[in-house]
Amino acid sequence: MKQQSALARLAREVVACRLCPRLVEYRERIAREKRRAYLDWEYWGKPVPGFGDPQAKLLIVGLAPAAHGGNRTGRVFTGDRSSDFLFAALYEAGFANQPTSVSRDDGLRLIDCYITATARCAPPDNKPLPSEILNCRGYMEREIRILEPKAVLALGRIAWDAYLEVLKQRGLIASRTPYQFAHSAEVQLPTPAPRLFGVYHPSQQNTQTGRVTAGMYTQVLAHIREFLAD
């Protein structure tokens, strides 16, 4: 399968990347020091590639791997509270075969959905620098070209802006300014760009305070499902 081989080749390049010295130092130090609850784990400690259905019509863009989540497990949105929230919602909407994501070999399969990140390495304080996002932009652009999705779902403002910046660099939009992020935002971008949807990021800061709820995700994902079916 053309898309599958292209994505596998890209994943190998992502895993080998060492472009950002700050992130390389941080991800590898966390992998050595570990968290007490995960002392028996062999941390991944490398950039985390995208994951999902190579025929996906929905591309989900997150922020970055968590230090003890994706940086530990080696799979995007796997092994932390954000993944618990996200995959429960994806399962309910029919985009995943199970509601949990705990390790690379847990049997999870995404359906018509592919998940990637704005930055591929865990950043200190979950805040990648603009230069680090720039270094990763080419990976996202290649994923978009390979997948040719019909819809993109941005998890949070940073992912929203990063995706729009890809379109700007491709000459599909002149500026990000007209396209403002909000939860349940929906934008029809110039052809051939896919429809863009936005939701608040499923971080604990948002889910535990009630800023974002399971019902809010259910509503947006159901709407995306209807859009893809048209």
Image (cartoon, rainbow, N blue to C red):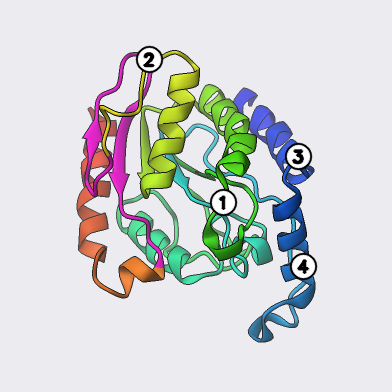
Q: Mark 4 = which residue?
A: 29
Q: Earlier in the sequence, mark 1 or mark 3?
A: 3
The label number, if any, that marks residue 128 in the structure image: 1
Image coordinates of residue 202 in percent, x first then y, are 37, 61
Discs 3, 2 touching: Cβ within 8 Å = no
Q: Residue at x 53, y 43 (%)?
A: 118
Three-letter amino acid code at disc 3? Arg
Can you tell which quarter of the image residue 154 is in? top left
* Local crowd size for mark 2, using a 10 Å CA cut-off: few (<14), some (14–19), many (≥20): few
Image coordinates of residue 75 in percent, x first then y, are 62, 56
Q: CA distance from mark 4 to mark 3?
A: 22 Å
Q: CA distance from mark 1 to mark 3?
A: 22 Å
Q: Mark 2 = which residue?
A: 192
Q: Mark 3 = which residue?
A: 12
218 vs 112, left or right, is left
Q: CA distance from mark 4 to mark 2?
A: 42 Å
Q: Residue at x 29, y 32 (%)?
A: 228
Three-letter amino acid code at disc 1? Pro
Q: Earlier in the sequence, mark 4 or mark 1?
A: 4
Q: Which residues are magenta?
A: 181-203
Above-or-below relation of 216 to 130: below
Three-letter amino acid code at disc 2? Pro
Image coordinates of residue 116 in percent, x first then y, are 53, 44
Of 37 and 134, which appears nearest the observer? 134
169 vs 215, left or right, is right
